[in-house]
Amino acid sequence: MLSFIAKFLAALNANSRPGEIGAAAAFGFMLALIPGGNLLWFALFILVFLLKVHLATALLVMVLGKLVVPLLDPLVETLGLAILNREALFPLFTAMANMPLVPYTNYNHSLVTGGLAAGLILWIPLFFLFILLVKLYRSYLWPKLAENRLVKGFLRYPLVKKISGAVGKAGGFWKGIG
Amino acid sequence: MATTKPAKLPKMFRKPIPKKRFEKKILGRIYLAKERDFLLSVAKKDEQERYVVSGDLSKAEAKRLAALAKSIRKNRGLVTGWKAAILAVLIGSLLIFNFLFKDRLVEAGMEAALENVFRARAEAEGVRLSLFRGSVSFDSLRVADREKPMENLFELSSSELRVNIWELLKKRVVIERAVCSGIQLGTPRDSSGALPESERVEEGFSPEDSSTSGLGALLADTDPEALLQAQFDRLGSPAYLDEVNKRYSQAVDRWPERIESLQDDLEAGKEAASRIAALKIQEIDTLQEAADAAKIIQENYPRVEEAASAVRRTNRDFQQDRETLTDLQRGVRDALEEDYRLLESVVADPGGELSGVASQAAENLLKARIGKYYDYALKAIAASRQMKTEEAEEKKDFSRQGAVVNFPVRGYPRFMIQELFISYGRSGSGEYLEASAQDISSDQELVGRPVRFSLKAEEGVHRVSGEASLDTREAAEEFLVLEGGLTGGGFDIASALSGMGLQELKGSADGSIAFSIDPGMQGSGTAEIRLENMDPVFKDDGNLLQTAVREVLSGTDSALFTVSFEADEGRFTRFRVGSDLDALLARRVGDFLEAEAAKLRERLKVLLREELASALEENAGLEELMGSYGGELAGDLREADSIEDIARSQRERLDARMQEIRDRTAAEAQDKAEDLIKDAAKGLKLPF
């Protein structure tokens, strides 16, 4: 977890594409929304792994998302049931039930379908929201933090240095500070 | 003059870069303004509008430029190649792991699936999976019996299953053909096969000890004395007689004292009566004498009355007591009659009992045998229901809630065994089984066919064959229909026939059984068993029944048993056995047993009378004693009446005598008065 946070901060401060972070956050939240233990989740995870998105950000958002997603379950379930019980989609779902591998996605579970649908719907807003946040951070917050004495002092602490070293690239995430 | 070596530039900056490319491919991939400014500060435009990075950079600048070049490269493209490589390596490792450990994984999966179906421990050994051939084989498999955790429901040895891989990709386990070369049922286990959460329900059919059945128990013990002793606690007369004698004894103890105390009163009355009787009433001549006599009577008459009254009261009490005791005494006779009837009923009509003696003896044995098959049928239904439930309620893989919406599937259900062949042992060895099943599935509605079973088995000298179908479809009229036969086999019953006085019965047997269980779990069926070439071995205790059965079985070598039964939820609600052997036994030994039974009845009566003789004698003695007390009291009563009569008579006579004296005295006084008047009249001189 600490590693994810350090890598996320490093990505924020390094020359990484804001879209990478935005997409990672959107995918991470989608992974949090879809219950694990099925082929769909694994397929999505592999996709996230292969795409050029910031994996640490995706994992961090997923872990944090898992904490809040149970609160959204009633909504996700309602959405899932609404989709699964839609008559127009019945032939599609029936065909999917008889396709190879598809049944392993557990698509007929309301939380899986609801989570996928909610994740897809929220993907674009989250993507652009995170891009905006990254840009705002880089334009306004980061320069101020770089000059802040408290932050500089904090980074000189041996423990913080040690943690920074332990997370590898983290040494560069405060590039320009200190 | 020393010259400084120019810093080595990153590859992308070594050649001049066209403006368009520089802005799109390099500047466009720098997202930090500071870094962009830095690059623009070190990259200068040449005369062709190309960007050229100067080689005169400080060490720090060169290092920063190298890092920048690296990040620019990193920001290219959508897919990371090295990640794909890592993933490929991971997937490869997983496949290798699966290849190496797939057998272990399948073993665990198989055990979990079987435990889920049978709700008891399942243990598989030597499991091998071939994904290319689509086959699973194992060396042994044991599934514990949920109801008897220290026994296995079944145990399979070397077996092979051919799995439909295409259907497996659709998340359906379809076993096209399963061949198990060895099966054993009910084998013992070293450890309990109960799962932690499974509930143990000790139910089912179990044989009972037929030696306790009515006639068998009775006629096996025809010693009248022993029989009387065995029935003694049920008899009412001994206790009743004791109670009556106790009440008599209390009366006998009480009455002598009371009668004795009465004698003093009676003596006092007699004395008083004698004083009254001593008065000579006719000699009383004057009123004074009469008054004296009346005084004596007045003084003594109450004592006479008191004595008479006491005697009468005592006699009345005695008569009441006697009446109560007489009623009790009459009850002794009634109790004895009742006990005679009881003893007669114990020695029941042997003709009637014999009509079912063979059936009774066979009933529990047949119950146990048929119950065993019925139990297996119920277990098959339970397993089928469990599979159906699993099909309907898809297991959730998540900790979160949610609902599963089932969509119709085509072709196959989630679980199906199309053909199952099980064999064990060698035909003719006495331990042989050959069973097959078709279309075992978790959704018979989808398959459109019931599960069909067939069986051929040898168990010792028994040969069994049968066919069954298990239909859990909504429209099914019967859940399970079974038809079986027992052919060309022998039988050897070494127990459960002790009621008939048999130690062992051997022979050959043919039979058939048919039963069905409806969706309400109510079952009914019939069975027919023909025993032939019977070779009985009798017990040595030489009782009456043994003699009779020996005589019958020596002249008969075949018997037919017919069974009809009904069951509900694993328990027989009706189980009737009939046999032609019953009629034969009844006919052959009925008369003999009837005579024996009549003798036994009489003997029992005599024995009971002998048993109660001393109590009856005591009762008679006490009754006699009470009679003597009654006689004594009757004498006292007569005496009391007599003295009272005497006293009353004297009193009446005195009253009459006194009246006479009064009348006479009055007459004399009148006469005297008249005389005086006459005398006075004579001396009187009238003036005129």
Image (cartoon, coloured by chain):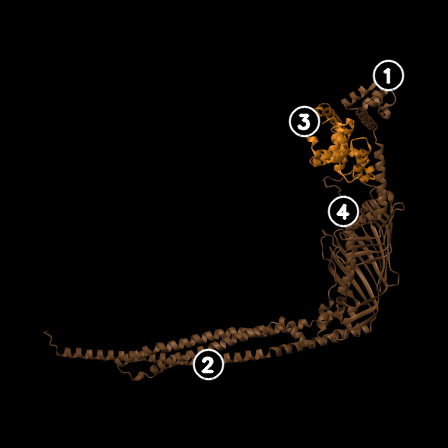
Chain coloured orange: which letter? A
Residue labelled with disc 3: A149
- Examine the rendered structure and indicate whether residue B328 appears above or below residue A170: below
Q: Secondary structure at mark 2?
A: helix
In the rendered view, tell whether residue B514 sits above or below residue B673.
above
Provide the residue designation for mark 4. B389
Residue found at the very far top of the displayed protein: B47
Question: Residue drawn at (72%, 76%), measured in percent from left and top?
Answer: B596
- Front-most of residues B490 and A68: A68
Residue B671: percent from the left, percent from the top?
Answer: 21, 79
Q: Nearer the viewer, residue B392 or B173?
A: B173
Rendered image: mark on residue B632: 2
- Residue B651: horizontal and vertical position, in percent? 33, 79
Q: Quadrant of the C terminus of chain B?
A: bottom left
Q: A2 left or right of B322?
A: right
Q: Tag 4, which chain?
A: B
- What residue is pinned by disc 1? B46
Q: CA distance from mark 2 to mark 3?
A: 137 Å
Query: In the rendered view, does A35 fall on the left or right side of B508?
Result: left
Distance between mark 3 and mark 1 Cα atoms: 42 Å
For the residue labelled by badge 4, is the local secondary structure a helix, a strand or a loop?
helix
A18 and B71: which one is in front? B71
Element carrying mark 3:
helix
Q: CA distance from mark 2 to mark 4?
A: 94 Å
Chain letter for mark 1, please.
B
Label 2 and label 3 in one chain: no
Residue B397 in the image: x percent, y percent? 76, 42
Q: Colour of chain B?
A: brown
